[in-house]
Image (spheres, rainbow, N blue to C red):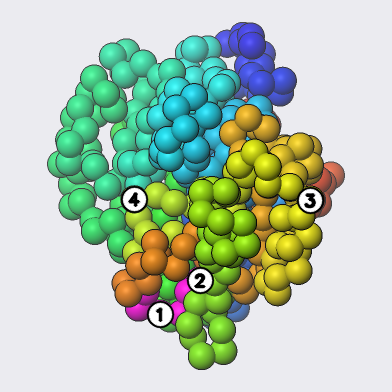
Amino acid sequence: MSNDSQTGISVNGRSYPMPKVTAVAICIDGCEPAYIDAAIDAGLMPTMKRIRETGTMHMAHCVIPSFTNPNNLSIATGRPPSVHGICGNFLLDPETGEEVMMNDPRFLRVPTIFKTYYDAGSKIAIVTAKDKLRALLGEGLKFDEGRAMCFSAEKSDTTTMAEHGIDNASEALNLEVPDVYSAELSEFVFNAGVQLMKSFQPDIMYLTTTDYVQHKSAPGAPQANAFYEMFDRYLTELDALGAAIIITADHGMKPKHKADGTPDVIYLQDVLDEAYGAEKARVILPITDPYVVHHGALGSFATAYLSEGVDADTVISQLKGIQGVDVVLTKAQAAETYELPEDRIGDLVIISTENTVLGTSRDRHDLTALEVPLRSHGGLSEQVVPFIMNRRVENLPEAPELRNFDAYYYVAQAAAL
């Protein structure tokens, strides 16, 4: 890792120039590309429509598993999970054997783009909807020099200068703390971004939202269209302030239910317990986080640890025969295919089909809070995400070569012109 305040920075094997205007990356959580298309077609996103015509609008692939933490940290480091180490929201810690949240900076194996720009003298502003990402994204930043801010909408009224670079962000920005299960949580992020552009004037900004709306509403639905109409208003302001902006997503979103509206779930732990006996296999769901109301901890990616004496080939054959199972790979195969850290995934990786999700045991999932038919993510069917810039970039590759974690590579170039 090296940097030069004149020529740019180098981090995790990639080089980035120093921006002349603010380089902004916006990660819209769960943004299936169809959401933007539907809102533009409804006449609700005039700025996005203009950007589609005069800027750059492509598709990219997110990393697998198509969950929040792996993809946000890929965007933040410019590299896949095999490099940065964050391969889920939740994991079986190989050091302790305990199931834990993967939001502790100790799990991060490389520096972020933000830290490296900061070390080169840049001003950094990071606003995330949920606090679970904040410590990872802000790792390595110093908040006592007036050049960095990193805080969440969720905990914005408890921020301090020492830990976040701003005292009581909610009060400072005159924004009420929204409910964590609301569209307003994401609106806080956009509003804060516009205000910080004007007052703090960062060189590098990262805004990342929550997928509450996308879990509840399909593309074109009234609540979804209202969300993207709201986003377009803030996008208009950021664009007018002269920032180079890239918009992408951590993953897409698909319906995961049967024709009658009930979740279409394969309870893997129950399947394996019945076939091989209790405690012969342990299923981990990397989607698991503290915010399960809208998805019930059900996603399309799971990993399984097998006890000694359980034949992996036999389990693979059995799981592949289950309707709704898309892919079953060994640890080594999955690590190579999806660029995952081999020491942080189970003996098997299982991915379900587009409209199916994976659970552990039926009695471990409380689905009573699901108010609408389940929509979720995690698999290959949620891998396509938007890759949109308000500047025209020529010769941009297409998906799958283009990845969401290429965001800063391209927006920094646009900001340096």
Q: Earlier in the sequence, mark 3 or mark 4?
A: 4
Residue drawn at the location 18% of the way across and 52% of the way down: 176
Q: Amino acid at mark 4?
A: Pro
Q: Would you say the residues marked 2 and 3 are in contact, meaning their CB atoms lie under 8 Å apart? A: no
Which region shows up in magenta?
370-375
Where residue 52 sits, quadrant-wise, is: bottom right
- The disc label shown at residue 313, or none: 3
Left or right, 108 with respect to 148, comes to right
In the rendered image, is residue 357 in sight? Answer: no
Membership of 53 in magenta stretch: no
- Where is residue 162 shown, x and y percent of the image? 24, 20
In the rendered image, which residue does mark 2 sit on?
375
Magenta span main SS: loop
Secondary structure found at label 4: loop
Mark 3 and mark 4: span between their CA atoms? Answer: 34 Å
Left or right, 282 with respect to 363, comes to right
- Where is residue 305 shown, x and y percent of the image? 60, 43
Q: Amino acid at mark 2?
A: Arg
Q: Amino acid at mark 1?
A: Val
**Which mark is nearer the camera, 4 or 2?**
4
Q: 197 or 63, which is in the foreground?
A: 63
Q: Earlier in the sequence, mark 1 or mark 3?
A: 3
Secondary structure found at label 1: loop
Q: Amino acid at mark 3?
A: Asp
Mark 1 and mark 3: span between their CA atoms? Answer: 38 Å
Q: Would you say the residues marked 3 and 4 are in contact, meaning their CB atoms lie under 8 Å apart? A: no
**Which mark is nearer the camera, 3 or 4?**
3
Q: 365 or 162, which is in the foreground?
A: 365
- The disc label shown at residue 290, or none: 4
- Where is residue 286 shown, x and y percent of the image? 52, 48
In the rendered image, which residue does mark 1 sit on?
372
